[in-house]
Image (cartoon, rainbow, N blue to C red):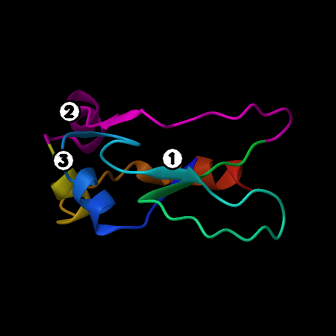
Amino acid sequence: MIMMVRTQKAVDNLLTSSFKLGVDASIATGPIGGGAKSYVVADIVSYTRSKGAYAGISLEGAVIATRDKWNKAYYGKAVTPIDILVKSSAGNLGSGELREALSKAFE
């Protein structure tokens, strides 16, 4: 799933420790079908790609929250969303394997 952040409101929410989709930030699914035109007005637009059978999901009401333990395990130190998204002061030298796996998944 890819989530495209389209408004400053959504960016501001990403910099907090948690927010609720549909309440703190509106969300919509992206264009459906080949060549579909979309005039979506939402803070965040989500796109998914699937193979085989697919059942739709609704993200309305889902909570996006930081996981401090997971961030510390991945980055090797305690980091905040601002450290990751704004300051770019967090990195993981082993992320190449993850990036490669994600790249292969979308071939």
Q: Residue at x 63, y 33 (%)?
A: 57
Q: Is the Cβ of the residue at disc 1 closer than 8 Å to that at disc 3? A: no
Magenta stretch holds residue 53: yes
Q: Write down the residue under mark 2.
A: 68
Q: In the rendered structure, which segment of residues is drawn in magenta?
A: 51-78
Among the two numbered marks 2 and 3 on one chain, the one whose residue lies closer to the N terminus: 3
Question: How many labels, in total?
Answer: 3
Distance in Å between CA atoms under marks 1 and 3 = 25 Å
Q: Write down the residue under mark 1.
A: 98
Q: Residue at x 39, y 42 (%)?
A: 21
Q: Nearer the viewer, mark 1 or mark 3?
A: 3
**Callout 2 secondary element:** helix
Label 1 Cα crowd, 10 Å radius (few <14 / some 14-19 / many 20+): few
Instruction: Say which amino acid is labelled 3.
Output: Thr
Q: Write down the residue under mark 3.
A: 16
Q: Quadrant of residue 103?
A: bottom right
- Please indicate, yes or no, whether residue 75 appears anywhere in the rendered image: yes
Label 3 Cα crowd, 10 Å radius (few <14 / some 14-19 / many 20+): some
